Image (cartoon, rainbow, N blue to C red):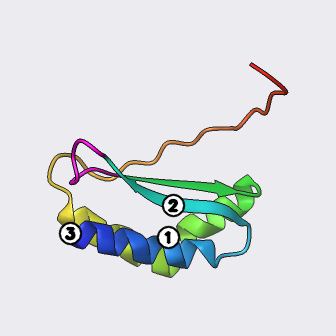
Amino acid sequence: MLALALALVLVEHSRSENGCLEYGCYQDVTNADRLLVVGRWTNQAVLENHYENERFRQLVTQFADLVVEAPPSVSLYEVVEMDRL
């Protein structure tokens, strides 16, 4: 799967960036053609730098050429830590 190989390059690149706490790619167990990329960053500024990074932009453009159902999308979440549920 070309998209998975591309995602692994994106993960490797992103993990090397300053401010990256976590970055991973996950493949849907019921649909191998569906990927989820999740990242966690130290703050909003480093995340914005990540989006502006030329290598990131190149990789995302390559993803757009492979996606059939819908264009790649980004959702941002703020993590709120709790002592217990």
Quarter of the image with the C terminus is top right
Front residue (pair 73, 5):
5
Q: Is residue 66 above or below residue 70?
A: below
Kindly give the residue lying farthest to the left in the view shown: 68
Q: Are marks 1 and 2 in contact (CB under 8 Å)?
A: yes
Q: Residue placed at 45% from the left, 72% from the top? A: 10
Q: Is residue 64 above or below residue 78?
A: below
Q: Which residues are magenta?
A: 29-35
Image quarter for residue 57?
Answer: bottom left
Mark closer to the chain start, 1 or 2:
1
* Label 2: few (<14), some (14–19) or many (≥20) C-alpha neighbours in 10 Å: some
Mark drawn on residue 1: 3
Q: Which residue is mark 2?
A: 24
Image quarter for residue 30?
Answer: top left
Front residue (pair 53, 79):
79
What is the three-letter code of the residue carrying label 2? Gly
Kindly give the residue lying farthest to the top in the view shown: 85
What is the three-letter code of the residue carrying label 1? Val
Mark closer to the chain start, 3 or 2:
3
Q: Residue placed at 70% from the left, 37% from the top? A: 79
Mark drawn on residue 11: 1
Kindly give the residue lying farthest to the right in the view shown: 83
